[in-house]
Image (cartoon, grey):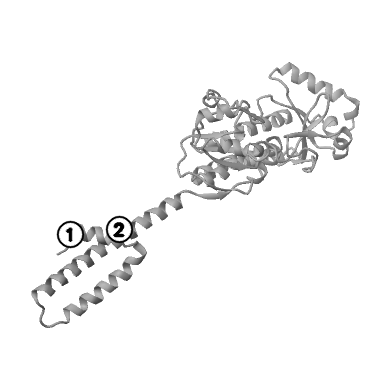
Amino acid sequence: MMSLKSRQRYVGFIPCKNRLLFLKAVASVAGDYINIRILRRKEMKKLLVLLTVTALMVTMLAGCSQSSAKEEAVTEKNAVVTDELGREVTIPENPQRILCLVSSAMNAMYNLGLEPIGKVEEYKISETGMALPSVGQAQAINMEAVYELKPDLIIASSRYHAALEEELEKSGAVVYFFDPDAVGEISVVDITGYFGKILNREAEGDAYVQKVMDQAAEIKTKVAATGLKTGIMLQTGDSIMAAQTGTAYGAMMIMMGLENVVPDDLPNAKKSPLVAFDAEAIAAANPDVIYLIAQSNDPEAGKQMKQSFMQDEKWAELSAVKNKNVVVLPFKANPNRVTPEEMLTLTANALLEKAQ
């Protein structure tokens, strides 16, 4: 008679997908035995063996089913998404060592309650983030520094880091490429909701976006009362640079209810938040309000910049100059130095305090 151990070993050789057929065959044979009126002792022993094997098969089939269910559950928890390079990426369920190669993504992680393991040099928002090991500047990543941090998830920009794809993958981490233009209309805010969906933190992401939008709604009402409808943000100097709508600076105007007069299709639009915009184009657009982006934290330097702009003859016919709606945007109001909600407050106050 076959021992229990031998039976288990014998049944174990049968693949899970074939065991149901085997079980039916065994049951059929067992049924034939039961229909026999008189069973000899030897036949009784055979029947006992068959019934024992049947019981073992039921147990093992149940085990196979549970194992398959567990495997499916694990697969469902690891989200498979397509990044901006068209790559299918399996995002870890609970990444522990996230490395972001742009400042905006770092800030989004903090908004979601996640802790990055490294920083890019541009990030100046929180003391915690600034104290992290550096991997260089966003457009000059130090790959050796990346490898030393041993990340399990790298969030990279399709604008700046596409050429580094193979090198980043050599770190052993999952690499996800995103494009700020693809995260939402107000990218500096929507990026948190975007990564919330990808990283299974959707509730946290939605809550953050709603908080900032509620703040923006209050500010928009106050700005509407001033009668100002269009605006532009400029960086003056050897050349005139203007902020596009898709940038953090442009996002501030959207949230304040101001239409940015700068077109979205200017040269180098995808490579820099500020693009060349000549005086003739600004005069033709004739914005209601002009923000001058401060180049330092020195208030006196800001005053001198504004005075020089107001006295420049090429701007004399602008409505913003005539109505004294030229405003210095504080140096701190920068997406790498403060959170979006803080930047919005600083940007709005610079205009509203002047209007009072």
Quarter assignment of residue 258: top right
Left or right? Give the position of 105 relative to 272: left
SS at badge 1: helix
* 175 or 4, nearer to the observer: 4
Left or right? Give the position of 234 relative to 193: right
Please name the residue that numbered disc 2 is placed on.
Answer: 63
Q: Tell me if mark 1 has few (under 14), some (14-19) or many (20+) residues whose alpha carbon lies within 10 angstroms of its own.
A: few
Quadrant of the drawing holding the N terminus = bottom left
Q: Are marks 1 and 2 in contact (CB under 8 Å)?
A: no
* Residue 184 makes an appearance in the image: no
Quadrant of the drawing holding the C terminus = top right
Kindly report the distance in space between the C-alpha atoms of the residues bearing marks 1 and 2. 18 Å
- The residue at 57%/27% (across/down) is 144
Left or right? Give the position of 297 relative to 76: right
Q: How many labels, in total?
A: 2
Residue type pointed to by label 1: Leu
* Residue 271 makes an appearance in the image: yes
Q: Residue 176: x, y in percent? A: 57, 42
Left or right? Give the position of 21 relative to 94: left
- The residue at 47%/48% (across/down) is 78
Residue 4: mark = 1
Residue type pointed to by label 2: Gly
Q: Residue 188: x, y in percent? A: 63, 38
